[in-house]
Image: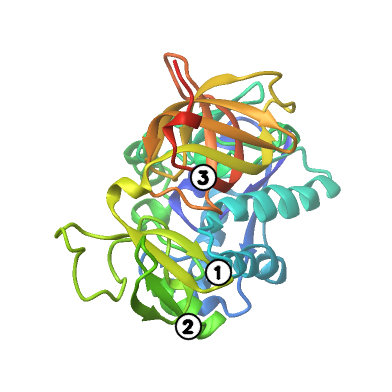
Amino acid sequence: MRVLAAMSGGVDSAVAAARAVDAGHEVVGVHLALSATPGTLRTGSRGCCSKEDAGDARRAADVLGIPFYVWDFADRFKEDVIDDFVAAYAAGETPNPCLRCNEKIKFSALADRAMALGFDAVVTGHYARLHDGVLRRAVDADKDQSYVLAVLTAEQLSRALFPVGDTPKPQIRAEAAQRGLAVANKPDSHDICFIPSGDTRAFLGATIGVRPGAVVDAGGHVLAQHDGVHGFTIGQRKGLGLPGPAADGKPRYVTGIDPDSGTVRVGSADDLRVWTVQAERAVWTSGSAPTGPVECVAQVRAHGGTAPAVAEAVDEGMVVRLHEPLTGVARGQAVVLYRSDPQGDEVIGSGTISATEHSIATAGTR
């Protein structure tokens, strides 16, 4: 096959490209320029897509002996990822920009251009496994990225390759060193790539501005003032601007956010327990929605936040009734469903959380 290898400048994508070459594919490397000011997007292991990353990707391509190009996707990235991220927080939601980047940039904009140029597939360094159209968790559970890939449609998965998903990360680094790739020991990037400082609240504050509101308890009593709902997310405990714990001495958590009134509600840990999740924009990795209830394992965060559940397709979305409660579940997050078999690693589908219910009466029963 003729494949396009997305090379971020890190070790995973470099080894993925190398394995594609070993498999006999005709490989072309491409680095995505996602910032109009690339020199500002890396601080040590924070950020990505800097000039340093582009140089590292080019040197890896040289070692592999494959053609290499840089494609400018900065405008598309700003519109589909950064602007979406800011708008979601302004609306009191908690988005996952990595998930949106995969959906809109790497497997939509990039893949569409690749197909238009005659490529058969896109290769990336994501930690996930793909076989006969079935998306599964990676062998390395700590690095698994199937959660942020669960937004991909069956068509998008049909033109994707994930060569490193069957190998633990330490072995990937060892392989890179054996191949003479200089990125073998390069630190993994973490946090949000377009916020290299790691201070999400400061970034949002500078972008959205001051939108004053009140922090209230379950009874509606005002406890403090704040500068904008974008500084809060469901389940947050620290940075609430409160003088101390509740009257019973227990900590308080963000339990609700109303972007229209600017109100942030706080309550106890028990108030965070969610039994039912409603989601919109459902994506079913098989290409079609299930015809009835499906026993599954639901995951609401990239790492952690899982519970057995029963899910059902409803119109263009889904309803997920949990057998065990989850906490810290926020609108804007993705809920990803995995098949509840002995392996428990097959992705069924995903949706964007639009509402939650706290009553056990609406939850699934075994």
Q: Residue at x 53, y 73 (%)?
A: 51
Q: Earlier in the sequence, mark 2 or mark 1?
A: 2
Q: Position of residue 13 (x, y in %)?
A: 52, 48
Q: Is residue 32 visible?
A: yes
Residue 233, quarter of picture: bottom left
> In the rendered structure, which amino acid carries the disc numbered 3?
Thr
Q: Residue at x 69, y 25 (%)?
A: 286
Q: Secondary structure at mark 3?
A: strand
* Cβ atoms under marks 3 and 1 closer than 8 Å: no
Q: Residue at x 36, y 48 (%)?
A: 272
Which quadrant does the N terminus fall into? Answer: top right
Which quadrant does the C terminus fall into? Answer: top left
Q: Earlier in the sequence, mark 2 or mark 3?
A: 2
Task: Report how many numbered discs are placed on residues in the image.
Answer: 3
Q: Position of residue 185 (x, y in %)?
A: 33, 54
Q: Position of residue 220 (x, y in %)?
A: 39, 67
Would you name the residue on which mark 1 appears? 259
> In the rendered structure, which amino acid carries the disc numbered 1?
Pro
Name above or below for residue 123 compared with residue 259: above
Would you name the residue on which mark 2 appears? 212
Would you name the residue on which mark 3 appears? 356
